[in-house]
Image (cartoon, grey):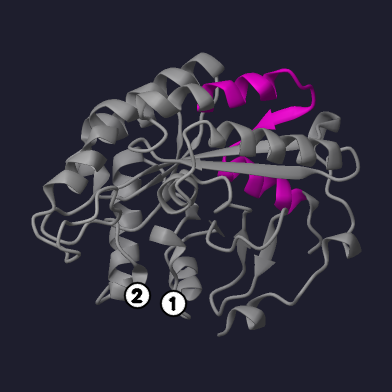
Amino acid sequence: MQPRDRAAYSAIVDRPPLRLPGEARIAVWTIVNLEAWDIGKPMARQVLPPPTGQVLLPDVPNWSWHEYGMRVGVWRFFKLYERLGIAPTLSINARVCEDYERVARQALKAGWEFMGHSWEQGPIHKEPDQRAMIHRSMDALERFTGTRPVGWLGPGLTQTLETPELLAEAGVQYIGDWVYDDEPTTIRTERGPLVTLPYTVELNDIPMMLVQHHESDYLLKRAIDQFDRLYEEGAERAKIMSIAIHPYISGQPHRIRYLERFYDHVAKHSGVLHWNGVQLLDWYRSQAPA
C-alpha cells in the first residue's frame, strides 16, 4: 500500500481543533535515541570521514565516537531530566538492553517510556527478514521492561511498503516515522489502524549537527523559535513539539548547555505539558473522531 493510500490529504485548517487538558497550549515530546552499532559493519553515522573516501572496517574512530554517548553523554541526559522531573520517550535499539544494560536499566528505573527502534541501527530495507526483526525487538523490550512497547520509530525513519502491517501485527499502536503534520493522525493498515505522532527531523540533532553542520548553540536558537511559534498557535488549537536527541551528539560537553537552556526557556511559560508517546496516544484517541 502506498503512503497516500494509507492517509488521505488533510489540511490542518479544515479539522476541528484538538484541545489539551487544563487549557494547556502545547505538549513537548522529548525523544532520546539510544542505538547499538555493530563494529563489524559500516557505522550508522560518521563524524570523521575515512581518509581514502572508502569505508574501512573496523571503523574505530566513528564507533568510539558513538560509544562516548553511552559511556558519558547519556548520563548528562539522565541528570538533566531527573532535575526537570521529565520522563522522556526512549527510542531504543533492543540490542542496547544487552550491550548497554547499565544504560537501559537506568532509563527503566527513571520511568522513561521505551519505544521500539529496531534490533540494531541500520536501515529497514537491509533487513533480510523484517517481520522476524520487528518481533525480536518488541519481544526483547517486553522481557526487559515487563511491558510491551506500543510505539515504534524506524532506524533513520526507514520503512518499506509493508512495514506498517508488520508493526501492527507485532502490537505497535503508534509510529514516529511520518513527519508530515503538527498533530497526530491515523493511517490505515491491513492489520488495523496505526496512529502517527509528530516526530521531528527539524529539531533532531543528527540532521542539524551532522548534516547541516551548525554550531553547537544552533539547537537552542531553533528549538526556542519552534517552541515560541507553536506556543503562540496553541492559543487556538493544541500543538505538539517534539525534540529528538542522541547522547553522542547532544550529550557532548560543548552542546549539553544549550539543551539545558532550552528547557529553562520552556519553564518560563504556563500551559506546557511534558508528555511521552503513550500519553500523546491516549490523549489523541480521546479527542479523535471514530
Amino acid at the residue labelled 2: His
- Magenta span: helix, strand or loop, mainly? helix
Instruction: Say few, some or many: other residues with alpha carbon within 10 Å of mark 2 (under 14 / 14 to 19 / 20 or more).
Output: few
Q: Residue at x 32, y 73 (%)?
A: 130
Quadrant in which the C terminus appears: bottom right
Residue drawn at (54%, 54%) of the image: 201
In the displayed structure, 91 sits above or below 263; it is below
Per the image, the residue denoted by label 1 is 160
Do the residues bearing badges 2 and 1 touch, measured as CB atoms within 8 Å? yes
Looking at the image, can residue 130 be seen? Answer: yes
Count the numbered circles shown.
2
Where is mark 2, residue-wise?
A: 125
Q: Residue 48: say if magenta.
A: no
| Lateral position of residue 223 relative to residue 235, left or right | left
Badge 2 marks a residue whose secondary structure is helix
Where does the magenta region start and end? 259-286
Distance, label 2 to label 1, CA atoms, is: 6 Å
Q: Position of residue 64 (x, y in %)?
A: 18, 40
Q: Where is residue 175 drawn, in percent x and y?
A: 54, 58
Give the residue type at disc 1: Thr
